[in-house]
Amino acid sequence: MSGDYGRAFAALRAQAGEAWRDYTRHAFVEGLGDGSLPREAFLHYLRQDYVFLVHFSRAWALAVVKSETHAEMLAAVGTVNALVAEEMQLHVEICAQAGIPADALFATTERPENLAYTRFVLEAGYSGDLLDLLAALAPCVMGYGEIGARLQAEASSECYADWIGTYAGEDYQSSCSAVGELLDSALVRRLGPEFETSPRWERLCRTFRTATELEVQFWQMGLTP
Amino acid sequence: MSGDYGRAFAALRAQAGEAWRDYTRHAFVEGLGDGSLPREAFLHYLRQDYVFLVHFSRAWALAVVKSETHAEMLAAVGTVNALVAEEMQLHVEICAQAGIPADALFATTERPENLAYTRFVLEAGYSGDLLDLLAALAPCVMGYGEIGARLQAEASSECYADWIGTYAGEDYQSSCSAVGELLDSALVRRLGPEFETSPRWERLCRTFRTATELEVQFWQMGLTP
Amino acid sequence: MSGDYGRAFAALRAQAGEAWRDYTRHAFVEGLGDGSLPREAFLHYLRQDYVFLVHFSRAWALAVVKSETHAEMLAAVGTVNALVAEEMQLHVEICAQAGIPADALFATTERPENLAYTRFVLEAGYSGDLLDLLAALAPCVMGYGEIGARLQAEASSECYADWIGTYAGEDYQSSCSAVGELLDSALVRRLGPEFETSPRWERLCRTFRTATELEVQFWQMGLTP
Amino acid sequence: MSGDYGRAFAALRAQAGEAWRDYTRHAFVEGLGDGSLPREAFLHYLRQDYVFLVHFSRAWALAVVKSETHAEMLAAVGTVNALVAEEMQLHVEICAQAGIPADALFATTERPENLAYTRFVLEAGYSGDLLDLLAALAPCVMGYGEIGARLQAEASSECYADWIGTYAGEDYQSSCSAVGELLDSALVRRLGPEFETSPRWERLCRTFRTATELEVQFWQMGLTP
């Protein structure tokens, strides 16, 4: 069900095993697919996700700072731009349509599960190099791509079709592929073509797994407005 | 009940209100005082606290990096040294006496509440200046000082007298005073003698409050091995 | 001769005094205006400036990371995008026209004066907050705007009309105004409406002045291929 | 003539070739050995070196932040402590004896060659991981060790015997060995036992070489008070 998001992602995803399944098949996700997710929970999630996007955009900007080549910079800048200029704006509009004015959205109090996740990602990036940062960013980017694509094919309700459509859509799916390519090439550049044999690989796996577990907590938070 | 940890700390503590009380009078703390805290919970806490200290020491080292004067550097270096060379070593010894060998201690799996707290502190420091970092570090340093001093006076059990004695002791109390002085002088240097009137003060208050809430979560985690 | 780049810039520029004049009226600059600058020196400068732009873009991406509001993020993202997607590309094209293929451009050896400047800016940003970073970024952004506008009015030769036109042009001038607004609003947000009375102001002035002096060195380097 | 500062240092030093020789056999160094270095140049150097040590200590504190193991933290903390509590104090005393009061020392204006070097090291550390930082720190630490040891054996004058004795002394030499061990073990931990075959090795070599070139500039600055 996973799109082709590259070689490193496939390996990272495989080693995250159960945590990856808990994340991509969480009750919140299933509720998006069959329409059983209460509207209140969805709107609560959207508001928290806006706060999340603020820090996630900052983390992608950090990926520009930590880039070593023009190609890496371009890939990271493209993502920052899409997040700040488009995805955050999309949230503002969806919330407005749902009766949450921008002011209320901007004033959302950050939940601890949200804070834990974004600070983990940013700190991984500040303390490490681009690889550490990308390993922490990948679960969100690609997980949403995978969830969107699966729900598009399987959803039994139209309730959350817009949300599903966004992440299943060509734009988002090609972002995932671009991030997959960035990850693969950044790994080869720094650790060589056999990057899975580098001692650093294990730590990158751990970072990816922890970020995946923090995604599980994020969905869980979504269920408890 | 609070020691004299300086002017800024008193103001930050006052505005944290209920969160500060929830932290310093948490059931875990009361259990240390009356001896009702299960040994298992205490040892679980100690192990997590060791992992905490690793990242907390890194955060204090970041305070050296973010210092602007020799006095700031000296104060921060002193704290790093005390944490890495002494407090972490103390944990190793206490755990060894309790039957937890160093290997097991080092292999402790970090709990999400632990991760949330330390990454929040480190990120505040990386993204901001020394003031943002100190506002995030202060609740732990001074809260433990306050808890230690109060329990020393009030404790009805000898069970955790060693732990209480460490934080009530002269060494730890004078570290708290030194950090209080560092905080006051760093604020005056950057924001002027009326630092509470600076627009930045509100953000520093929020950082202090969030760190305090993360301390509450940490104690809560301590109760659930 | 200076455009209206805001209140803080005017104050920072005034206090930089002689250094600002040395920078904006450097022999290299005058040579661009009267056409006396040897072509070889110009091409050498262009190649170094490309390397400069790589790190300057990274520094602007760091400004996104250090932003505290959506407006700050948007302003910084816009600049990163303009630098990475446009200005760097422009350099590639100009160099290609001048007979320097992209490969040779990318392989340019960084001169010490170049390295000193960009690492100073990045370190100011990493160690401080958004204000420290903007104070280090401003001399380049606004100085080029001022130089472009003046040479457009005064140039006695068409030799470097393209270069002059870029920085005198509406696009670049409005970027300068946008950065001026970002600087003003970031200062008011953090230090209050009377930001020049904050103790931090002096340090920000020093950072601006040092960056200006590093610009002088950069032009000087330009004269010695 | 080089002490045994480990395997990685030996390899890095070898590839730095001429730059390493220019650094460790600079006219300033030879002048320390034969006593021909003017006292004025030496005192000028000492003052700049004090400013250097401030930032160099901050960079070593960053190494604590970027550590991944307790052993790495301990090694880095030890160095920070030695620098901040001892070496900086030593400079204050030597300068005082030479008639430069502490106030004047603290007020030293940083020379561009000094700024370039320290900001390069700090930025390498912030943007990269511990390896990038150590590669930038090593030339100063080990170069002084090598210079001290050689001059101790070869010096034809007693003029600068104190300075030479400090760096030739057992304390300093064993710091160099400790940093060499830290470098070797950090490399093996992250890149494996054959770390020279990792794609990252080339970048680390470049960082080491650039830092070495910045040392040459620093001596050159020393000759021009």
Image (spheres, coloured by chain):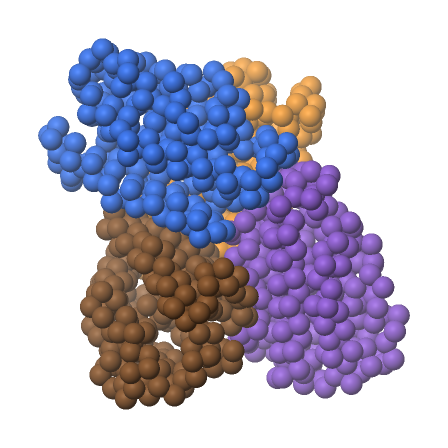
Chain colours: A purple, B brown, C orange, D blue
A158 or B123: nearer the viewer: B123
Horizontally, is C79 left or right of C9 in the view? right
| Count of marks overlaid on the render | 0
Which residue is rendered at x = 60% and y = 40% of the image? D192
Give coordinates of residue C149: x percent, y percent.
51, 36
Residue A137 in the image, given as x and y percentages of width and height: 64, 57
Depth check: B114 or B125 in front?
B114
Q: Up-down: is B99 above or below D114? A: below
Seen at 79% across and 64% down, the residue is A146
The answer to whether residue D40 is seen in the rendering is yes
Image position of B82 with respect to D216: above or below = below
Identify the image quadrant of residue A208: bottom right
Above or below, A84 against B222 in this view is: above
Q: Position of residue D65 (x, y in %)?
A: 44, 51
- In the rendered image, the quadrant that contains the N terminus of chain B is bottom left
Q: Residue at x 25, y 38 (%)?
A: D87
* For residue A31, side relative to residue A224 (left or right): right
Relative to C197, B215 lies left or right: right
Residue at 51% x, 81% y: name it.
Answer: B224
Q: Is residue B204 visible?
A: no
Residue A111, picture quadrant: bottom right
Across and down, in percent, residue D124 comes to: 48, 39
